[in-house]
Image (cartoon, rainbow, N blue to C red):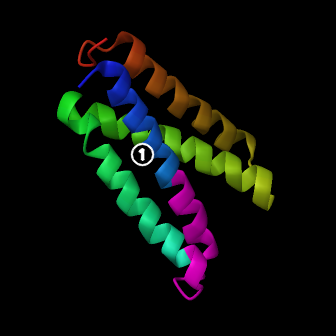
């Protein structure tokens, strides 16, 4: 699989996971039908899409990127759409997560460039 396709599928997996997690927060513990269906479909899609990059890149690297970027995006959506507050410690922590993802991708010899 070409490297660009590997990363495209990883990006799509992240998007699916972010949509699913956002819907999960609105599902009312799976008591609301539409957000619950979006959650289940989104997570199934996320894991299916994630299964392709994991064939090419090391599992830990794929998971670090997927979870790190997902955490930051979900937090951003929660802040922008739902008014959830972020203090300075949260902002610094999120910046460190993104820095960690960047370091892994740019400097790690375990990632195929």
Q: Please state the horizontal and vertical placement of residue 78, each as a whole percent of the image.
A: 70, 55
Q: Residue at x 26, y 39 (%)?
A: 52
Queried whether the magenta region covers residue 8, the answer comes back as no
Q: Residue at x 58, y 42 (%)?
A: 72
Q: Residue at x 74, y 48 (%)?
A: 86
Which segment did they paint magenta?
18-35
Q: Of 104 and 55, which appears nearest the observer?
A: 55
Q: Of 7 and 29, which appears nearest the observer?
A: 7
Q: Please state the horizontal and vertical placement of residue 9, each as a whole percent of the image.
A: 38, 37
Q: Quadrant of residue 105?
A: top left
* Position above or below: 105 against 63: above
Location of the C terminus by quadrant is: top left
Q: Which residue is mark 1?
A: 13
Queried whether the magenta region covers residue 29, the answer comes back as yes
Main SS, magenta residues: helix
Residue 60 shows up from this direction? yes
* In the image: residue 46, left or right of residue 55: right
* In the image: residue 97, left or right of residue 8: right
* Identity of the residue furthest to the left in this view: 55
Location of the N terminus by quadrant is: top left
Q: Please state the horizontal and vertical placement of residue 45, each as a whole percent of the image.
A: 39, 56
Q: Please state the horizontal and vertical placement of residue 21, each as a whole percent of the image.
A: 53, 61
Q: Of 15 and 107, which appears nearest the observer?
A: 15
* In the image: residue 38, left or right of residue 3: right
Residue 84 shows up from this direction? no
* Position above or below: 112 against 14: above
* Position above or below: 87 against 93: below
How many residues crowd mark 1 within 10 Å: few (<14), some (14–19), many (20+)? Answer: many
Q: Residue at x 36, y 62 (%)?
A: 44
């Amino acid at each position: 699989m070409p490297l660009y396709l590997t990363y495209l599928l990883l990006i799509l997996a992240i998007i699916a996971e972010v949509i699913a997690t956002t819907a999960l927060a609105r599902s009312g513990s799976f008591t609301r039908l539409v957000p619950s269906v979006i959650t289940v479909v989104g997570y199934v899609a996320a894991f299916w899409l994630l299964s392709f990059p994991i064939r090419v890149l090391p599992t830990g690297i794929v998971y670090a990127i997927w979870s790190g970027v997902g955490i930051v995006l979900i937090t951003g959506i929660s802040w922008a759409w739902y008014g959830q507050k972020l203090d300075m410690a949260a902002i610094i922590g999120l910046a460190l997560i993104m820095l960690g993802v960047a370091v892994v991708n740019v400097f790690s010899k375990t990632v195929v460039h």
